Structures are given as C-alpha cells and as structure tokens.
Amino acid sequence: MDLEKQPQQPVAPAGPAPAGIRASDADRDRIADILREAMAEGRLTAEEHAERVDLVYRAKTVGELEPLVQDLPAPGGTARQSSPAYGYGAEGAAGPAENLVAVFSSSTRRGRWRVGGRTNAFALFGSVEIDLTEALFGQRLTVVNATSIFGSVEIKVPENISLRGSGTGIFGNFEVDTLESADPEAPVVVVNGYSVFGNVEAKPKRGKLITNLHRQLRKHLGH
C-alpha cells in the first residue's frame, strides 16, 4: 500500500463547547472579557456594553453566549482561553439577585459581606447605600441596577477595582466616576439605572483598597 497516496485525515481543531452545552462561569467570564475590551477600544458604547453584559449572565448555554460577541474581533485574532484563574467562586453570578428597597425609609449594605453577581437597588422617597469597600467578591463581574425616584442610591467601591456605569437622570442626577484597575484580574462593578427627581451616584472611596486580592479570595473560597 502506498501511504503517500492516501489522503490525510484533517485533525479537527479544538473549539468552543457545542452550542447546546450549559455555559460555565469560565465561559461567561471569557465573553465578558471580550465585551470589556471592545468597550475600551470604542467598539461598543457604555449602554451597549451594559446590555450585553446583562445578557451574558442570564445565558444558560454556550449557544446563547457566542452571538453576543459575533460582531466583535477576538483579542489577538484568536479566541480568549477560559481560565479558572482569578480565584473567584462560581456561586455569585448564578445565584439570585439581592434586592435593597427603601420606600420612605433607608436601606444600607456595608461591612464584610459576599457580593453576588447582581444587586437591585430601589429608592422611592428614601435612600439606599451600598458600600463595597470591605466586601468579598465571589465573581469577576458585579452588576448593580439602581433606580431612584425622589430618593438616592449611593454606591462606594474600593479604589483598586474597575467601575463602570450607564444610566440617565431625569430632573435628577446619575453619576458614575469610572475607574479602570491596573490589575486585569480585579473585580469589575457595573452600575446601570436611572433617577427621576433623585440621585444615583457611584464612586471609589478614597484610601479604601482590596489588599492581597487573589490570596484573600482563594482563602475565603477554600482554594
């Protein structure tokens, strides 16, 4: 038999998981990273980024994730490799949203607490304060949906994480002091929402840092 005349069988390249496979947290983080870089490069507006990121963490399968970056170039021309680095747990983004509601009252979340993937804050003639400066982040991305009607929502974050936001003030104020961490593995907090005759404000708290970020997260999560 002349082996040189036999056709070579192509070797299938390793690719992403089949579309029907349930998405993992690593899959979601990979897509969120691509969206983050696209916004940094000006390919996506802050509003488009916020909409897509919200869909990322609602997606159940890999097939729901890939269309969110189909019109964006892969970093370096190749797909970003999923990695369990960061030391973040899986339970944060997949769990239920935490709701903080203040109607003619006040609601405060501060101290050492584990932040979930999504927090909803609603203030009606009241005030909500979310202090993340001592919080434990169980995932890479944290989304805060803030609504203020004749009230106020205030979010404070450490100075060494990334802070982004998208929202509207209608006869009110919506202000996010955007921040980009020098550490590419630092948590990312995205604040979305609107205020009507009210105030939504998110900013870093001076002097507050997450120290030894990765070691503390791994220790807390038992890694």
Image (cartoon, grey):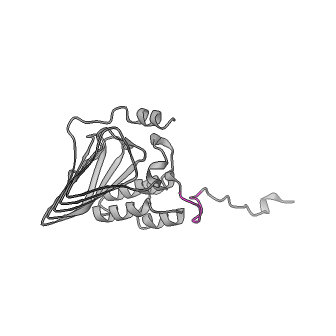
Q: Is residue 6 left or right of residue 199?
A: right
Rendered view: 26 above or below 50: above
Of residues 138 and 5, which is closer to you in this image?
138
**Which quarter of the picture shows residue 194?**
bottom left
Residue at x-position 57% and y-position 65%: 19
Question: Residue farthest to the left?
Answer: 171
Of residues 73 and 113, which is closer to you in this image?
113
Read off the magenta span: 15-23
Magenta stretch: residue 187 in it? Answer: no
Question: Residue farthest to the right?
Answer: 1
Residue at x-position 42% and y-position 55%: 75
Magenta stretch: residue 18 in it? Answer: yes
Quadrant location, the N terminus: bottom right
**Which quarter of the picture shows residue 151?**
bottom left
Q: Position of residue 116 (x, y in %)?
A: 40, 50
Question: Residue farthest to the front?
Answer: 104
Q: Position of residue 123 (x, y in %)?
A: 23, 59
